[in-house]
Image: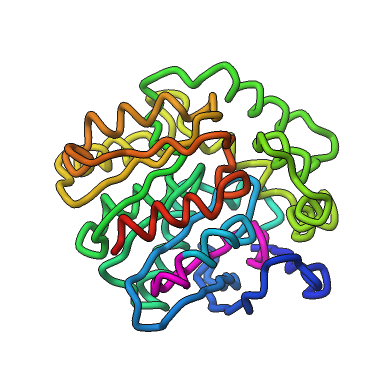
């Protein structure tokens, strides 16, 4: 598998992101390895929050959340998905599959970090991948925070706005990562922060991950990931550990998923599910400190 590794100097001087990257190797399907990165904050013996980002961001997205969690005594761990951030980036879109992304995060979290009693915090693709991990390894997880995410099976139609995003990514001659992130925020995005989202991707070849991820979302019942996602739903519909839906009020793509999760997951029943106001799809940008307080309160 051919992969690109973003030079370290692309990440120099990131504003508000003092966390030192750590690295490990995960297996690629061709018998080689890929380097996968993560950052963490908080006490090493604190309760664990696994913060999973989505498309087209990286662990930088969680910088405000991490600071709040660390101050609350929580060990916050934010990986970069393969193809994003400081992690290696397979150059072929065909090297990315839903199942492979689940396996890469599993290998990092369980085989290398040995995490247990985990609270998942998943947004966008971080929820798609994370909810699969919860369903496939339920003994590893203590709680779930689903934030602007879901787990499509291809049995229901995707929103028109999602298809617009899908088509825009697929047809763009040059993929403007920072612009896509900014479009998912309602409070704006500082120039330095927009540059931080562009940093992992110095050229078009390095953007295979962001370019392919929308095509990996199951949109038909026959999708390669549909059966595994249906199996995951069977587990989630019996999940009685605490499950919190912390959605924003300004995300037309995933907003309809919050009541579905609350209705179908037993662990969500009887909880007070917050709506984070004045926040878009990337609620970590618009209201990161508030999301951090929600997660910290839920954990402690």
Task: Locate residue 209, reporting x and y percent.
Answer: 65, 49
Report the magenta residues as a range. Answer: 69-89
Direction from residue 71 to residue 141 in the image, left or right = left
Residue 278 position within the rendered picture, expressed as x and y whole percent measured from the top left: 57, 34
Image quadrant of residue 192? bottom right
Asked whether residue 87 is drawn in magenta, I would say yes
Decide which of 14, 96 is in the foreground and name it: 14
Q: For the point 48% across and 46% down, which residue is it?
A: 123
Residue 271 lies in quadrant = top left
Q: Is residue 92 left or right of residue 115?
A: right
For the residue pair 147 and 207, the one nearer the viewer reads as 147
Quarter holding the C terminus? bottom left
84 with respect to 151 (left or right): right
Percent of width and height locating residue 79: 53, 65
Task: Report the coloring of the rendering.
Answer: rainbow
At 43% from the left edge and 31% from the top edge, which residue is drawn?
223
Q: Quadrant of residue 188?
A: top right
């Amino acid at each position: 598998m051919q992969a690109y590794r973003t030079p370290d100097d692309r990440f120099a001087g990131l504003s508000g992101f003092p966390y030192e990257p750590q690295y490990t190797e995960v297996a690629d399907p061709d018998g080689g390895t890929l380097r996968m990165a993560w950052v963490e904050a908080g006490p090493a013996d604190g309760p664990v929050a696994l913060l999973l980002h989505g498309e087209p961001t990286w662990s930088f997205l969680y910088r405000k959340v991490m600071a709040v969690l660390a101050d609350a005594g929580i060990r916050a761990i934010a990986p970069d998905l393969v193809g994003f951030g400081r992690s290696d980036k397979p150059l072929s879109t065909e090297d990315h599959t839903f199942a492979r992304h689940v396996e890469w995060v599993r290998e990092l979290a369980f085989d290398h970090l040995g995490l247990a009693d985990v609270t998942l915090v998943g947004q966008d693709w971080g929820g798609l991948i994370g909810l699969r991990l919860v369903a496939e390894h339920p003994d590893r997880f203590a709680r779930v925070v689903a934030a602007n995410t879901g787990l499509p099976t291809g049995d229901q139609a995707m929103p028109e706005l999602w298809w617009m995003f899908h088509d825009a990514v697929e047809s763009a001659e040059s993929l403007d990562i920072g612009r896509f992130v900014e479009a998912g925020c309602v409070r704006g995005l500082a120039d330095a922060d927009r540059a931080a989202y562009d940093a992992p991707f110095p050229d078009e070849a390095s953007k295979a991950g962001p370019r392919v991820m929308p095509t990996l979302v199951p949109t038909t019942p026959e999708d390669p990931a549909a059966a595994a996602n249906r199996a995951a739903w069977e587990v989630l519909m019996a999940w009685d550990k605490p499950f919190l839906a912390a959605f924003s009020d300004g995300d037309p793509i995933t907003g309809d998923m919050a009541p579905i999760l609350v209705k179908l997951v037993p662990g969500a029943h009887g909880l007070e599910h917050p709506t984070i106001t004045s926040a878009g799809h990337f609620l970590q940008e618009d209201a990161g400190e508030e999301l951090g307080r929600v997660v910290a309160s839920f954990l402690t």
